[in-house]
Amino acid sequence: MQLGPDFYTQQPPQAVAAPVWAARNTALLQSLGWPQELLSDSHLPAWAGNAVLPGSTPLATVYSGRQFGQWAGQLGDGRALWLGEAESAQGPQEIQLKGAGRTPYSRGGDGRAVLRSSVREYLCSEAMHGLGIPTTRALSLVASPEPVRRETTETAAIVARVAPSFLRFGHVEHFSGQASTDRLRQLADHAIQHHLPECHDRAPAWQGNVYAALLDVVQERTARLLAQWQAVGFCHGVMNTDNMSLLGLTLDYGPFQFMDGFDPGHICNHSDHQGRYAYARQPNVAYWNLYALGQALMPLIGDSELTVQVLDGYKTLFPRALGDAMRAKLGLTGALAPESERDKDWQLVEDLLQLLAAERVDYTLFWRRLSQALASGGADLDAVQDLFIDRARWQAWLKRYVQRLNLLPGTDLAQVGQSMLRTNPKFVLRNHLAEIAIRQAKLGDFSEIATLQDLLHSPFDEHPGFEAYAAQPPDWASQLEISCSS
Ligand code: AMP
Ligand code: MG
């Protein structure tokens, strides 16, 4: 809104028939310090898009982007409406409705989101938050019987999302390469002033060039985000530049997946025929996307060598962040290890990942059981071994790991295990768990969404009685096909 009309089009939401609450996030509401009545029945029409909140001027923003490696030209909020910005206990927050009807950027789409994908977005953004991974949040989920046509006829839903900013790489790409750089500069300055003021402190490191510093900040946040995704086994599925947050948040939940059996080549998006966004490729794709951002910022940075130099930072920052994240998963935290130690630890990680991949061992279960084994002082080690067929290979790796643990100063293995239990989650939003919640929601029963929300809010806690939610997926889970269609 502060940016001016070149950046958006005002657009009221389109009403839906017979809206009902499918989920409400009172924990988020409280943490933002917003009044409880915002999620009371009197506000249901506003979160359904059937009424406009007082003081709100809904609008759709314009952006562009590269989709599956190709320049896609102008895109924009085709089904998301920006309702405004509000102060909160955690700083100013923007609010969006996703699925609230057509906008000038809908490009033939209906501006709607189906219940299936909305349940997934609502739950996954909260799961990511519970895991400590930067993400947009979800405040409410409203369902409507209104029909929405996809491969079959489904029903509509509207998610209210909250984030300090929904700015994407694609916003920058859109205003780059135009005859005048005024808009681009206005956008970049807005991002720096309102959302990334640390760019000013970092500018001296880049010859006083604040736009190079902006790229550096985004590069660093993206590297850290990707390290967290990889460490937890999260596949985004559609890492197009229009789905990349300038703030380094996980954004636009579509065909994402938390891996079950570990497979570096895993492709979670059924529409991704080339595997461009396969799990192991995500870090490189992020780099490619940062390159696109760097190119888009070139008219402001004005120095291609400097731009490349900034982007080079990712090549050391990402492996370092991933190495640290994986070492933490193994309980190898504490004093910063010298470089040679880090290299050795990384070898330990790589060999483990190869072992997990060779047997498609369940990624989340493995880490959790390993953590428990240590926390129990070794008593629960059999439960880890049970995950492997090639036990000799597992034993050989374990021997090296125990040797490494014994090098930790004053090692108390049970204590290391406790810290690992705070690092390796028991609960992630596996596809089949989301699917069960979706099937029930389609029948008008939203209780499973609430159960999952509760578990995923504190995924490191044991939650006695909910073991089934942390177990191996059932056979039918591998048949689930999740595509871009949403
Ligand atoms: P996505 O693949 O969900 O990130 O969407 C890519 C682009 O298509 C974005 O600009 C969306 O706003 C737009 N889009 C996706 N689905 C719809 C829809 N049902 N109606 C209108 N626009 C859509
Ligand atoms: Mg998108």
Image: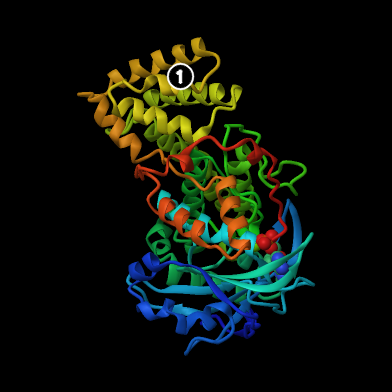
Tell me where residue 411 sits by quadrant.
top left
Seen from the viewer's position, the closer of residues 287 and 357 is 357
Mark 1: give few (<14), some (14-19) or many (20+) Cα within 10 Å: some
Residue 409 vs 110, above or below: the answer is above
Please name the residue that numbered disc 1 is placed on. Answer: 385
Seen from the viewer's position, the closer of residues 233 and 446 is 446
Q: Secondary structure at mark 1?
A: helix
Seen from the viewer's position, the closer of residues 304 and 176 is 176
Give the total number of marks visible in the rendering: 1
85 displayed left or right of 154: left
x, y percent for residue 320: 44, 37
Q: Quadrant of ligand 2?
A: bottom right
Whether label 1 lies within 8 Å of ligand 1 gets the answer no
Residue 30 vs 264, above or below: the answer is below
- Residue kind at label 1, given as amino acid type: Gln
Q: Residue at x 76, y 61 (%)?
A: 72
- Answer yes or no: is residue 353 visible: yes
x, y percent for residue 195: 44, 68
Query: If the image is split into quadrants, where does the C terminus sit?
Result: bottom right
- Answer yes or no: is residue 245 visible: no
Extreme-left residue of the structure:
410
Q: How is the image coloured?
A: rainbow
Q: Residue at x 61, y 66 (%)?
A: 172
x, y percent for residue 314: 52, 44
Extreme-top residue of the structure:
392
Tell me where residue 345 sits by quadrant.
top left
Tell me where residue 5 sits by quadrant.
bottom right
x, y percent for residue 405: 31, 21
229 displayed left or right of 175: left
206 displayed left or right of 442: left
Residue 454 vs 182, above or below: the answer is above
Residue 167 vs 423, above or below: the answer is below
